[in-house]
Image (tube, rainbow, N blue to C red):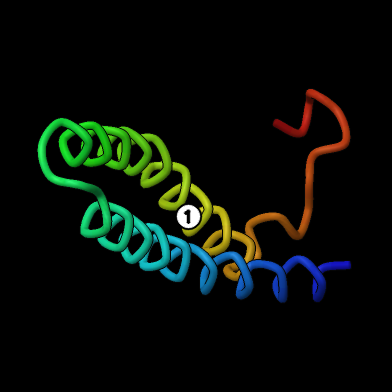
Amino acid sequence: MNTIKKLLGVVWLALAPLLVGFMFMQAADKISKAADGIVKTNTTLQWVIILIIFLPICAGLAVFGFYALKGEYSHLPENSEEL
């Protein structure tokens, strides 16, 4: 089970920057394809909000993957006295 946790840590650690890059590529693509004027402004605003929400989520995914790879989740507490 610890091997699976470490492998998933590698997956999450690799997935976080890929997701960030994919979101920025999609944002640039959608903003460049939007019509000029208010439509472009609205599209830009929507993507800024999306990025503000999802960038901390991706950072948390990377931190979670780092700790899983490091082995911090090898032994989980079984009762409150172990905390």
Q: Position of residue 76 (x, y in %)?
A: 78, 46
Tell how many labels. Answer: 1
Question: Quadrant of residue 29 in the image?
Answer: bottom left
Residue at position x 42%, y 42% from top? 54
Expressed as whole percent of the image width and height from the top left, the position of residue 48 reads 25, 39
Describe residue 42's horizontal placement relative to residue 58 as left or right.
left
Q: Is residue 42 above or below residue 15?
A: above
Q: Quadrant of the C terminus?
A: top right
The spot of residue 21 in percent (x, y) is: 36, 67
Which of 10/25 is in front? 25
Vertical side of 29 occupied by 46: above or below: above
Q: Which quadrant of the figure contains the N terminus?
A: bottom right
Residue found at x 78% / y 25%: 81
Helix, strand or loop at mark 1 = helix
Looking at numbered disc 1 in the image, what kind of residue is underneath it? Val
Q: Say if 37 sits above or below 11 in the image.
A: above
Q: Residues within 10 Å of mark 1 (few under 14, many from 20)?
A: some
Please tell me which residue lies in front, 61 or 19. Answer: 19
Residue at (76% x, 66% y) in the render: 5
Write down the residue under mark 1: 63
